Amino acid sequence: MSRVYLDWNATTPPLPEVVEAMARAARDAWGNPSSVHAAGRRARACVEEAREAVAALAHCDPRDVVLTSGGTEANNVGLRSAFAESPGTLVTSRLEHPSITRVADALEREGRAHLRWVRVRTDGLLDLDDLEGAVSAGGVRLVAVQAVNAETGVLQPVVEVLEAARRRGIRVHVDAVQAFGRSYDVAPEAATRSLAAHKLRGPKSIGALLTRPGVAISPVLLGGSQERGVRPGTTDPVAAAGLAVAARHALASPARWRAVGPLRDALEAGLLALAPGARVNGAGAPRMAHVANLAFPGWRGPELVAALDLEGVAASSGSACSAGTAEPSPVLVAMGDPQAAASSVRFSLGEETTAADIEIALSAAARVLGR
């Protein structure tokens, strides 16, 4: 059976060059990057190479790159740092990744933050009028906004959010995990941004928090002085070696990801023809060219995903970090369509997706939907 991978938003297949670089590092740079001897210096070189490669991708100084275990940790540190000294108001929306929304809820329970949830439009975009009202009400310490929605691919109005916050001197955290390597706009004006290597054809368990000069960052964990004390613990030089290669590859990746747009459109058109009544979530908003999220009324999203997998097609029914839960997609619920929240499937293409892959996927979908 030919297998087709259409779940690139969950994770990307690592580049062969990434695997090779990690194998070399595992053999030659296994030392502790904090050690001053030769083995430590070789490991430290891998870590600093990764920092420089990420800085080039993010348009920032290497000194403003804090390596983390991934996007979730970067989001946690970015949010909690804003409320480390005193309480304030956090403005965000239910479109965000769980590593934003659940931290926001925790900050409120802890008495650190008062939450203002911005309304979401039915097309999956933030309601900018409601955002203006939220940031104008006073006391706002932080606005947290994603660059790209992981489930629908909708591009959020980050430029407008940054401008509304700048006029009032409000700090902004941008979850750019789904944007780096896929979009040219990576919001360098934000106070903090998050990145995950495994969305860039790199390894899992490494990412970065990117800070604007002068922005205070507080650790979530306490321990050693690694990563300026913001992220204590021994940094893995093997993962760092993979991140360096992936970040350099990602510099030219947006053009490759945009090129799959016609394939995504063909997939959507084919699926809509196979399933009368199906609809594309977020169709009226600007979207990344590689994401197709469709609601199939009368079906359950997880059941469709399982059936497609048996036919050789990998897709998903929501964010990978929410997989395995019985709850419908919070993103699609926020968009005001509870039926879609329970019946949707996300297909996310990648820079190696081919026309043949789309034909195989549509044939598999025809067999599943025709039952």
Image (cartoon, rainbow, N blue to C red):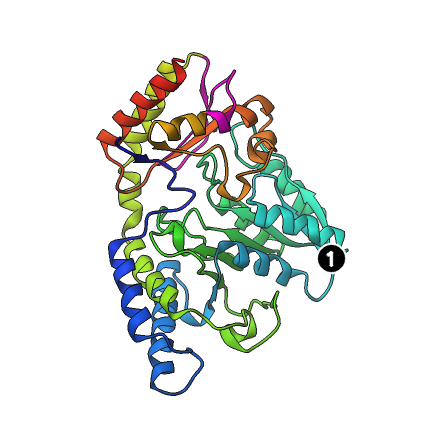
Q: Quadrant of the N terminus?
A: top left
Q: Amino acid at mark 1?
A: Arg
Q: Quadrant of residue 61?
A: bottom left
Magenta residues, as a range?
Answer: 277-303
Q: Secondary structure at mark 1?
A: loop
Task: State left or right for residue 223 relative to residue 8.
Answer: right
Residue lying at 35% horizontally and 50% vertically, measured from the top left: 181
Residue 43 percent across, percent down from the top left: 36, 76
For the residue pair 246 and 31, the one nearer the viewer reads as 31
Q: Is residue 209 above or below residue 147?
A: below
Residue 207 percent across, percent down from the top left: 45, 59
Q: Is residue 147 above or below residue 275?
A: below
**Is there any visible trace of residue 114 in the rendered image?**
yes
For the residue pair 366 and 47, the one nearer the viewer reads as 366
Is 67 a magenta residue?
no
Residue 73 percent across, percent down from the top left: 54, 58
Q: Which residue is mark 1?
A: 112
> Around disc 1, counting alpha carbons within 10 Å, would you say few (fewer than 14), some (14 to 19), or many (20 or more)?
many
Residue lying at 29% horizontally and 72% vertically, measured from the top left: 27
Residue lying at 25% horizontally and 61% vertically, measured from the top left: 20
Q: Residue furthest bottom?
A: 37
